[in-house]
Each structure stands twice: as structure tokens, then as C-alpha cells.
Amino acid sequence: PLVTLAEVLQEADAKGYAVGAFNCNNMEIVQAIIGAAEAEGAPVIIQASQGAIKYAGLQYITSLVRTAAAGTRVPVVLHLDHGTDFEQVLRCLRAGFTSVMIDGSKYPLEENIALTRQVVEIAHAIGASVEGELGRIGGTEDHVSVSEREATMTVPEEAARFVAETGVDALAVAIGTAHGRYKGKPQLDFERLAAIDGLINTPIVLHGSSGVPDEDIRRAVALGVRKINIDTDIRIVFVEAMRRALADNPEEIDPRKVLGPARDAATSVIRHKMRVFGSAGRL
Ligand code: G3H
Ligand code: 13P
Ligand code: ZN
Ligand code: NA
């Protein structure tokens, strides 16, 4: 069934694990996410970015995930990833998303709080959940120095104020992860994460989690991370499997012979993540 983010994170918080939030762009990825969740007995968050909605269409994304959720015992959250456009957030809520992220991280603190609080009022009125972001989670291609990166990280005292004044159901923090493929090994600021967790009761979200070593993920979960976003690691295995299928069978013209192996590869990587996050076997 379709459930809210608040519901799955409350359960995760009580039991001390994290729920995977996997980005989807098409039917095969939605099926891979649901297939993995069923195989592992794990609650799951399926999220669509504004780019995914632009690519697939809001009604297609909504229908795919609703269909998947209706046919499974797995609790499924349909979540907007990095909503930056207020109108887009409203369109998603109207379409039936059970959760939205309002990413006001590019604004000064006061404006981020005001925008986020406005979304919380609307979403909560209709029974949907909201994730906010404080601190700036950049891309791996952003060339920033150590001190510049430090300046973008979440300030624990500001996090306490942000959750108190907005009422968000989950808070995305910047502690050293980045979106996309890492060049070296990511350096997570675990002290900062512990400080944030010590000041807030709101579940913490880790973005840019592809490429973060399993042991670092486990440590972050132990320190209070309850939602973990994965996109790049799915993209990598999905497209690699397509390339392999095409290279192995240059005469192949059946899309199912190319996309089927990609779907299987995505299912495997998602199943592994669920075991690392501790969400496997919770149903
Ligand atoms: O945070 C970024 C996600 O990986 C979504 O990426 O905007 O290319 O769909 P996208
Ligand atoms: P990755 O692509 O680095 O896994 O980040 C995903 C993400 O944070 C989506 O919001
Ligand atoms: Zn993100
Ligand atoms: Na990443």
C-alpha cells in the first residue's frame, strides 16, 4: 500500500534502521525497486526528481508507483525529490504523492524556513509528509576547497531551529556527501552528524549516498540517519547492463532483451542497499 514518509520513518526510528529512497525515471526502475523491496521484506521510498517528472510525465510516474503500491504488501512512499518549485510541489500533492521534499537550501536560513513552513502547512493539511534541506549538498563535479565545503555543511544549532520552526517530518543534512559519482573516497563528518542528531528528534536524511562505502553507511545509520537517497548507483548498473546486452548481441532489436537485464541489475544493487541500511526483513 501507499503510505506517508512520516509513517515509515517513525517505524525506522523506533527500530534503529534507515529506509532506502531510490530515484525512478521509468517503469523498469519502479519495478526493480518494488521487486527488491518484496524480495527483502523492506519498506521503501520511491522518489522522482523534477527532472524525472519532466522526462516521464507526472501522471505516468504517479500511475506507475500507485499500481506498484496497490499490488504489494510492502509499504511504499511516493516522494518528490528536491522540489525547488512551489507550484511543482503542489502539483505532486494534487497528483497523490504521499511526501514531498521542499529544497530551500539555496536560500538564506530565514527564507528557507518560511518557504518550508508554507509547504508543511499545506502538505500536513492533506495528510502528506515533508522533507526539508539545510546546508548545501553539492555535486561531485563541484570544485570546492575543504574550507568552502565546510562552509556549506549543516550547522547543528541551525538544524534545531529549522525543525522547530518548520515542523518537517525529515531533514536532509550536508555532512560531506555529494550527488553523483565520487572521484576519491567521500569524507563524512560523523562528529557533525552526531551533534545534529543530539539536538533534533526529526529523522535525518542522507543524500548523495551512492558510492559511500557500506561501513560508512552503517555508521551513519547508527548515528541517526533514517532515509538514504540512492540514484547514481542504480544508473551505473542499469546502463552498464544495457551496454553489455547491446555489445553481446549487436543484432538484437527487442528492447526487452536490453532493458530486462538492466532491470535485473538494478534489483540486485537495491537489494544489497536494503540489507546495508537495515530495512531488509522488517515486514
Ligand atoms: O539529486 C539528484 C538526483 O540524483 C536526481 O537527479 O535531477 O538528474 O533526476 P536528476
Ligand atoms: P546519488 O545519485 O549520489 O545517489 O544521490 C541521490 C540523491 O541524493 C537524490 O536526492
Ligand atoms: Zn539529493
Ligand atoms: Na554520490
Image (cartoon, helix red, strand yellow):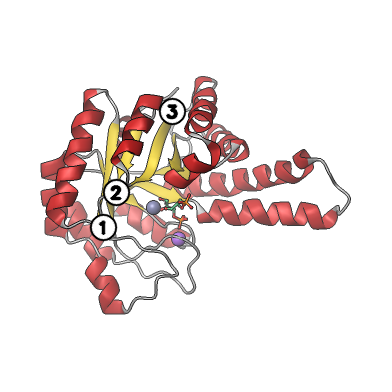
Left of 32 or right of it: where is 134? left
Return the x and y of residue 66 as percentages of the image width and height.
Answer: 49, 24
Give 1 or 40, whichever is nearer the viewer.
1
Please determine whether, in this image, residue 83 is positioned above or below residue 10: below
Tell me the residue that label 1 is attached to. 106
Q: Quadrant of the N terminus?
A: top left
Earlier residue among tags 3 and 2: 3
Instruction: Please give the label number shown on residue 103.
Output: 2
How far is the residue under mark 3 from the one under mark 2? 25 Å
Left of 210 or right of it: where is 125? left
Residue drawn at x 25%, y 66% as measured from the top left: 152
> For the residues carrying marks 3 and 2, which lies nearer the camera in this image?
2
Tell me the residue that label 3 is attached to. 75
| Residue 173 appearing in the image | yes
Please determine whether, in this image, residue 209 is positioned above or below residue 27: below
Q: Is there CB contact under 8 Å for labels 2 and 1?
A: yes
How far is the residue under mark 2 from the one under mark 1? 8 Å
Residue drawn at x 78%, y 42% as measured from the top left: 257
Please determine whether, in this image, residue 150 is positioned above or below residue 223: below
How far is the residue under mark 3 from the one under mark 1? 32 Å
Give 137 or 171, whichever is nearer the viewer.
137
| Mark 2 close to ligand 3, CB under 8 Å | no
